[in-house]
Image (cartoon, rainbow, N blue to C red):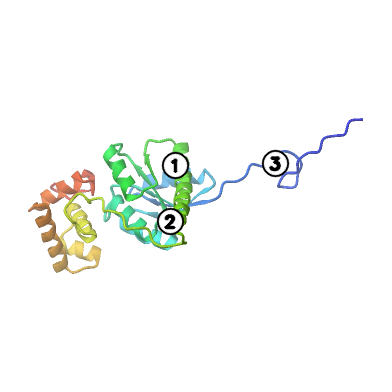
Amino acid sequence: MAEEPKRVPRRDGRHGRAEPKARPTTTIVLVDDHTLVVQGLKALLHSEGDLVVVGVASDGRRAVELVSRLHPDVVVMDIAMPRLNGLEATRQILQTDPDVAIVILSAHSDPEYIERTRELGAAAYVLKDSSLSAFAAAIRAAKTSRGVERASQEERRGTKGGRAPARASPLASVPSLSVREVEVLQLIAEGMANKQTAAELGISIKTVEKHRQKLMTKLDIHDVAGLTRFAIAVGIIEGRNRGPGY
């Protein structure tokens, strides 16, 4: 009589085929200023099981603060947002937390946008009309590639830890604009008065006025409408974010 073949025990203790290995959890911070978009993304990612949204920010400044506190594996970042755009937020996040992987989620298919995010150190660029499977795959791949990149950097340095070199501003081609000047420029372009800008950035009105004057001198632009057009042209804001009358 032939001997009955042995069945492989499952992880749950029953006999049968072994269960597939579960994917490791990936923690995510979502950054987008559209509530419906964020709610939809959270629901879609939740359905994947291993992709867990641990925080949400509606502007770049809040994103920088949230990432520094939560240290997620991945940040999903829109580009055009109020207070601080996604490009500058990406630069600031990676300067202080180089281990995080940033996935840009944008409606822009312009190669210039894609190249600029690559230069800043973003791990992936996904269009908003992509499928859920492509989006989820990009997030998982970004987390993995960031880990491989970090290990490679540590091996080359011959030591663990250390801070990654500072990355260039998205306005690197513009004559020497500081981080603060970029922030002031965005708020001016969004229609904020000096008093509002001062309150937003936690600086004095006089300091805002100095930054505004420096911007106009460096860019050779001498009115707010011109600064707004420039901010739109270089991608700091989109036309929908500009202040009234421009």
- Quadrant including the N terminus: top right
Q: Residue at x 10, y 60 (%)?
A: 213
Q: Which mark is residue 99?
A: 2
Q: Residue at x 21, y 68 (%)?
A: 203
Q: Which mark is residue 38?
A: none
Q: Determine whether 192 is above or below 43 in the image.
A: below
Comes first in the chain, label 3 or label 2: 3
Comes first in the chain, label 1 or label 3: 3
Position in image of residue 45 (x %, y %): 48, 45
Q: Are marks 2 and 1 in contact (CB under 8 Å)?
A: no
Comes first in the chain, label 2 or label 1: 2
Element under label 2? Answer: loop
Quadrant of the image occupied by residue 209: bottom left
Question: Disc 1 marks which residue?
Answer: 138
Position in image of residue 139 (x %, y %): 45, 45
Q: Amino acid at mark 1?
A: Ala
Q: Determine whether 31 is above or below 69 in the image.
A: above
The nearer-to-camera label among 2 and 1 is 2
Position in image of residue 197 (x %, y %): 20, 61
Q: Residue at x 67, y 42 (%)?
A: 19
Q: Amino acid at mark 2?
A: Asp
Question: Disc 3 marks which residue?
Answer: 18
